[in-house]
Amino acid sequence: MKTTNLKTPPFLRPGATIGITAPSFGCTIEPYISRFKEACRHFEQLGYKLKIGDTVYKSDGIGISTDPRVAARELCDFYCDPAVDAIISAGGGELMCETLSY
């Protein structure tokens, strides 16, 4: 039987930067706006820096925050940014498959 080693990233330490993007649904209506603001306050109180993408506040897409190509570009930019230590999706997920193809 073959065993594999599970790779786990290091825990985030205070001062780490969390990128928040919306590859599916953003935070443009209530209660999502209030919940997002509270989550941001909580992360900052824990000592994390936040890099919030434009897609979090976009609502020009149909059922998705914005054009999937725009969302994909932002996700890739966050992934490739050495200053971003972790990435969190702002919300949703149902239409993320449209974004991931880009």
Image (cartoon, rainbow, N blue to C red):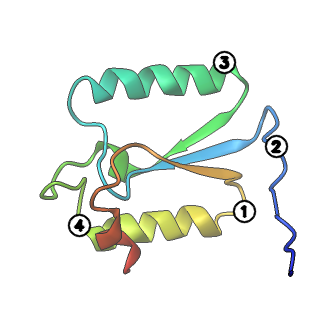
- With 82 as the anchor, is 87 left or right in this view? left
Q: CA distance from mark 1 to mark 4?
A: 25 Å
The vertical placement of 43 against 22, above or below, is above
Outermost residue on the left side: it is: 62
* Sequence-first disc among 1 and 3: 3
- Residue in front for this viewpoint, 5 or 83: 5
**Residue 11's disc number:** 2
Label pair 1/2, CB-CB below 8 angstroms = no
Q: Going from the N terminus, do you reach mark 4 or mark 3 first? A: 3
Q: Secondary structure at mark 1?
A: loop
For mark 1, does the 10 Å Cα neighbourhood hold few (<14), some (14 to 19), or many (20 or more) residues?
few
Residue located at (53% from left, 67% from top):
77
Disc 1/disc 3 C-alpha distance (Å): 23 Å
- Report the front residue among 25 and 6: 6
Q: Residue placed at 37% from the left, 43% from the top?
A: 91
* Residue type of the residue flagged with mark 4: Asp
Q: Which residue is mark 4?
A: 67
Q: Amino acid at mark 3?
A: Gln
Q: Position of residue 88 (x, y in %)?
A: 53, 47
